[in-house]
Image (cartoon, rainbow, N blue to C red):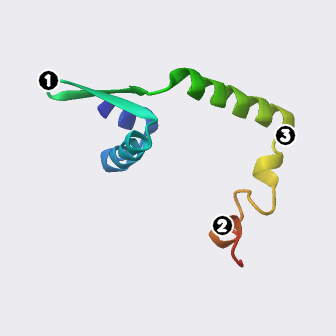
Amino acid sequence: MVDLTAHLGLAQSTVSKHVACLRECGLVSARTQGRATHYSLAHPEATLALLEAAEQLLELTGEAVALCPNYGTGASAATMSGGVA
């Protein structure tokens, strides 16, 4: 967890909650060794394929995703969840 928190620049509690969610969803595996827990991707090939597809989509759309009035950085939470802004 220490490596992740340092790399991401987030609080340990935040990273811990996200890793727990990923474990519960079956996306991350954990292996305990002594007092340390080592985490790894449960399905690395599928995860890498998903990341490659996302990168291709971003290359095709450029900044259109960030500039979208409905889902861009300026959109409200209500708009993004389908509610009324």
Q: Give the left or right position of residue 67, taking residue 15 as reference.
A: right
Q: Check residue 61 in the rendering and tell me which mark sits there, or answer none.
A: 3
Residue tagged 2? 81
Front one among 52 and 10: 52
* Amino acid type shown at disc 3: Thr
Residue tagged 1? 34
**Which of the two labelled residues, at mark 2 and mark 1, occupies the earlier sequence position?**
1
68 versus 5 height, above or below: below
Judge the density around disc 3: few (<14), some (14-19), many (≥20) Cα neighbours within 10 Å.
few
Residue drawn 37% across the image and 30% down it: 29
* Amino acid type shown at disc 2: Ser
Query: Residue 28: x, y in percent?
Result: 41, 33
Q: Are marks 1 and 3 in contact (CB under 8 Å)?
A: no
Residue drawn 65% across the image and 72% down it: 78
Query: Residue 77: x, y in percent?
Result: 63, 68
Rendered-image quadrant of the N terminus: top left
Query: Residue 26: x, y in percent?
Result: 43, 37
Helix, strand or loop under label 1: loop
Q: Give the left or right position of residue 64, taking residue 35 as reference.
A: right
What is the quadrant of residue 22 in the picture? top left
What is the quadrant of residue 59 in the picture? top right
Front one among 81 and 6: 81
Helix, strand or loop under label 2: loop
Rendered-image quadrant of the C terminus: bottom right
Mark-to-mark CA distance, 1 and 3: 46 Å
**Which of the two labelled residues, at mark 2 and mark 3, occupies the earlier sequence position?**
3
Query: Residue 54: x, y in percent?
Result: 71, 34
**Which of the two labelled residues, at mark 1 and mark 3, occupies the earlier sequence position?**
1
The residue sitting at the left extreme is 34
Front one among 74 and 49: 49
Front one among 71 and 31: 31
Mark-to-mark CA distance, 2 and 1: 43 Å
